[in-house]
Image (cartoon, rainbow, N blue to C red):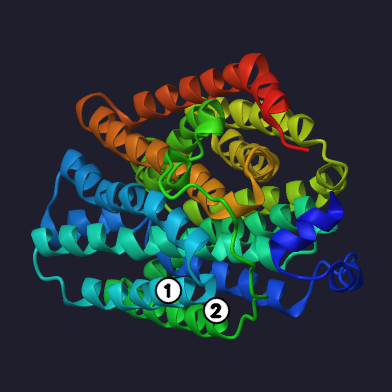
Amino acid sequence: MQQKISNNDGCSSEEEGKETEKLWNKNYIKVMISNFMLFFAFYLLTPLLPIYLDAQFKADKDTIGLVLSGYVVATFLVRPFSGFFVDSFDRKKVLMLCFFFFFLCFSGYIGAGTLLMFAIIRTLHGLPFGAATVANSTVAIDVLPSSRRNEGIGFYGLSNNLAMAIAPSAGIYIYSATGNFPLLFWLSLGIALIGFISSTSVKIRKREPVKNKPKLDLDHFFLTRAWLMALNISLFGLCWGVMSNYVAIYGQKELGITDGTGIFFAILSGGLVLSRLTGRKALRKDKLTQNCAQGVILSTIGFTLFALAINEWTYYLSALLIGLGNGRMYPAFLNMFIKVARNDQRGTANSSILISWDLGMGIGILIGGFIAEYISFSAAFWVTAGMQATGTLIFLLFTRRFYLQRKLS
């Protein structure tokens, strides 16, 4: 089986053996840097865009939700084709092309003078973002030695999780200090450029063409074998979408915490890091369902505490628990998607989990904005806690067994 995997990766068993224990090779580090910069540039703006749209264009809450969800729709539409192109063509060229257009889109925010123009730019930005994330994560799998792949995928996910946690804090801190939105747009543009440059220096082994591969198959665009896992991860993406996009306004208007959002995301990122470090041995031993079960339960407790928001201590404790939970849950799910896919379907497996996550996030942003507009932010986060609990039950009762039945040896 080891020899077979080596052939599919396009390298000899002798070369594979030399890198068996070398997790942190140069190419893997470069891919990690590219991924971190990709997500950092994007999420530096995420918690501030509702405030920007309110201040700059006087948009109401449901309009803000509609505008911000546009990129998720575009990302959702492009990702099935991204998986197909990554599996069918030169992955590095696909990655560089997508990353370059992702970088260019940040200049559009600087020049957008109307709400309609901003909505168009934000929506179009989802296309290269969605494609680049699929290409980069698939390249990461290619440069990892097979014996360290579970562990490596877990650490790779930490790069975007950290960026998604730290970047909002950094954005909020910079805006609080300067009150300058154009500065943030320029910073995102520069950070994206660094990520693009890093991606151009990655070296990937040439892959052998897959023989007897069906010319037209639904599995080229979505991993149908993982449909229940996809549904499950969508529910968790919904919860993250509501939390990450509305936590700043929720803290200000409902809890009276005017400068605590940065601390919230800092604690969240600390939980993510701690969870990845403590869970690495379990990933190496292939204990994916145990890792995932622990993660979803911790996240459920965290989102429930967040909705309760009894005081600042429960507010910050919820951040820690959500970070610990997602740090266990997401890499386990990503590995499960990879393990139910053939070696020539890595791009499709990556695009499938990202499609599912983004679908949930998009629905979460829309639902969160709608409920906040017509009921309250508190009600929106109670719905979030309920969705997280539902997803947890589905995993424990059904998805865990579903994965074990479809896992490929």
Indicate the quadrant containing the C terminus: top left, top right, bottom left or bottom right. top right
Judged from the image, the secondary structure of the residue bearing numbered disc 1 is helix
The residue identified by callout 1 is 99
Which corner quadrant of the image does residue 174 belong to? Answer: bottom left
Asked if the residue at tag 1 contacts the one at tag 2, i.e. Cβ–Cβ closer than 8 Å, the answer is: yes
Q: Which amino acid does label 1 sit on?
A: Phe
Judged from the image, the secondary structure of the residue bearing numbered disc 2 is helix
Give residue 317's position: percent from left, percent from top: 64, 38
Name the residue at 69% across, 48% down.
271
Q: Residue 199 carries which label?
A: 2
Give residue 154's position: percent from left, percent from top: 71, 52
Which corner quadrant of the image does residue 114 belong to? Answer: bottom left
Name the residue at 46% across, 33% down.
234
Q: Is 405 placed left or right of 119 in the picture? A: right
Q: Which of marks 2 and 1 is nearer the N terminus?
A: 1
Q: Which of 285 and 189 is in front in this view?
A: 285
Mark yes or no: residue 170 visible: no
Q: Is 227 placed left or right of 252 in the picture? A: right
Give residue 363's position: percent from left, percent from top: 33, 35
Q: Which mark is residue 89?
A: none
Q: Is 71 placed left or right of 291 in the picture? A: left
Which residue in the rendered view is the most extreme toward the top?
397
Number of numbered discs visible in the structure rendering:
2
Q: What residue type is labelled 2?
A: Ser
Mark yes or no: residue 395 visible: yes
Q: Is 40 placed left or right of 277 in the picture? A: left
- Answer few, some or many: residues within 10 Å of disc 1's Cα (few below 14, many 20 plus, some between 14 and 19): many
Give residue 405's position: percent from left, percent from top: 70, 23
Q: Nearer the viewer, residue 262 or 352?
A: 352
